[in-house]
Image (cartoon, rainbow, N blue to C red):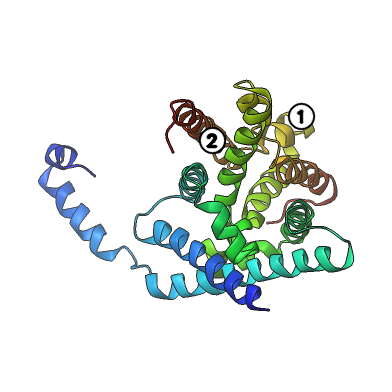
Amino acid sequence: MEKFIWAFIVGGGICVIGQIMFDVLRLTPAHTMSTLVVAGAVLGGLGLYEPLIKFAGAGASVPISSFGNALVKGALMEAERTGLVGVLTGIFEVTSAGVSAAIIFGFMGSLIFKPKG
Amino acid sequence: MSNKKIKKLTPTQQEYKRFAKERVPKRPVLLNTIRAFIAGGIICTIGQGVQWMFMTYFGFSEVTAGNPTVAVLIIAAVLLTGFGVYDHIAQWAGAGSAVPVTGFANTIASAAIEHRTEGYVLGVGGNMFKLAGSVIAYGVFSAFVVALVKITFKALGGI
């Protein structure tokens, strides 16, 4: 049960960082999301993101910053197994589910739904 | 606007700039951050709930439950986008609904649905990644650099 509370606090906290980038730094959503992904990748490289996921669960793995972390994780995992080429082959290994699901269901959505307004 | 550009303007134009700047509506930063915190927190808590469900009822481990959880959140976000509900949530929540992975799915689904009238290949296929493309491009490139740096450090015997 404790994990739900930490997921709420950490997930909300990451969204607050995003909102501050929206409002105070006046970045567009695309800039904000790209920055968070890069930040996640750097934190993942430093080995700081995995402990955060262990601690907060979905609070750290649902925000987009975990996408960056997962890309680095896949690249490093595969590099350990197959050498330097693994950086290229492994980069989408962990995130494949998210990216593929977004493409597939986004496409299916465009078949079903009509644009509004 | 940079100082150089302001100097090039005529006095009337400069005066108008000041006039316009005073009248730009101030953003309620505190209220927005509170809303983002609540909405983002709720989405992540739902994610945690879905993950818990996969772990207790479907026998996934904590690590393997991540993928189906993300997939469920993405399906939900696409459906909400299609029914036009996600827009309303996003208006209230700001970054709270844009930062979680559901926001990523929302940008893909909304771009795909919006450009449907331009045809399925050039419209849907070509515009799907209009917003999400930047996230993937920067994510992949930065991950590539970070991975190379880390491997180099390891090879040199550091960290």
Q: Work out which quarter of the rendered image holds the C terminus of chain B and state it.
A: top left
**In this rendering, do the residues under marks 2 and 1 share a single chain?**
yes
The residue that disc 2 covers is B143
* Residue nearer the viewer, A23 or B100: B100
Camera sees residue A94: yes
Chain identity of mark 1: B
| CA neighbours of label 2 inside 10 A, class few (<14), some (14 to 19), many (20+) | many
Q: Is residue A82 above or below residue A35?
A: above
The label nearer to you, 2 versus 1, is 2
| CA neighbours of label 1 inside 10 A, class few (<14), some (14 to 19), many (20+) | few
Seen in the image, is A75 located left or right of residue B56? left
The residue that disc 1 covers is B121
Q: Is residue A67 above or below residue A8?
A: above
Q: Secondary structure at mark 1?
A: helix
Query: Residue B135, percent across and down?
Result: 56, 41
Seen in the image, is B130 located left or right of residue A38? right
